[in-house]
Image (cartoon, rainbow, N blue to C red):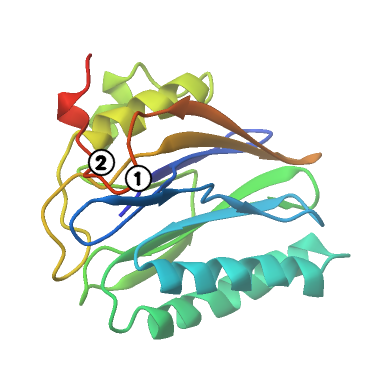
Amino acid sequence: MSAFFAVAYHNRVEIVSDGATTDGEARLVRAETKIQWSPLMPMAAVATGHSYACGMLLIHSMKSTVTFQDNQDSANDYLIETLPELADTLFASHGSFSLAIATMQAGTRPRLLHIHRGSAHGPRQATWTSIAASGPGFSSEHITAIGGIRNGLVSAGVALLDMQRKWTAKPLDGAAEGFYIGGHVDHAVINAEGVTINRVHEWPDIVGQLISPREENV
């Protein structure tokens, strides 16, 4: 399942994401950086849902930076025009998904595009927004519970994902109820200068074993 949280601030977008790829029983298959970024312009993307379909959305997003590498605003326009329909096609039989793309408008204005569908047969939504989130049980009350996000997402983002990690979920049809957030937390900053990504937290999950956050020492 995985989880991410993204916020557009006045001069940047920040993203935090876990790194777990799991099987249908909630066993950790591998831990990897899920935030994809472009070396050609300030743009990064992260997605949750069926792994193949998410991968195709991320590839499409990053290819736009090659096609429009001299004009980021054109890349942004292209993505909002093409990604929703592509998501409908890719996830036609794969249920819910969530995709966040952090970019800059006119070189200096942070933008955050969120394309998501909450259930297998629910409506797909695509909006420019200030906050995008994906993961089990998230609500605005949890932002208050971690002390707010005014000072950025390094500490607050880890706290939020650690909270969600302890909630069970059933991410896809046929999957077992279990814990699907794990591996580590990566933090990305997207601003006019480009993209930086850092590993800011590690969980003691073991490849090949169930993710079991409730057994951890608090």
- At a point 76% along the width and 69% down the height, the residue shown is 74
- Residue 172 falls in which quadrant of the image? bottom left
x, y percentage for residue 184?
A: 43, 35
Report the disc number at residue 207: 1
- Give the amino acid at mark 2: Phe
Q: Position of residue 26 (x, y in %)?
A: 22, 52
Q: Residue furthest right?
A: 70
Q: Nearer the viewer, mark 1 or mark 2?
A: 1
Would residue 37 be found to the left or right of residue 182 on screen? right
Compared to residue 107, the image places residue 50 above or below, namely: below
Residue at 84% across, 65% down:
69
In this rendering, is residue 178 above or below 189?
below
Amino acid at circle 1: Val
Q: Residue at the location (72% across, 53% down)?
A: 105
Mark 2 crowd level (few <14, some 14–19, many ≥20, 10 Å Cα): some
What residue lies at 28% left-to-right and 73% top-to-bottom? 123
- The x, y position of residue 133, in whole percent, is 38, 46
* Residue corresponding to mark 2: 138
Q: Is residue 190 above or below residue 141?
A: below
Can you tell which quarter of the image residue 216 is in?
top left
Q: Quadrant of the C terminus?
A: top left
Q: Secondary structure at mark 2?
A: loop
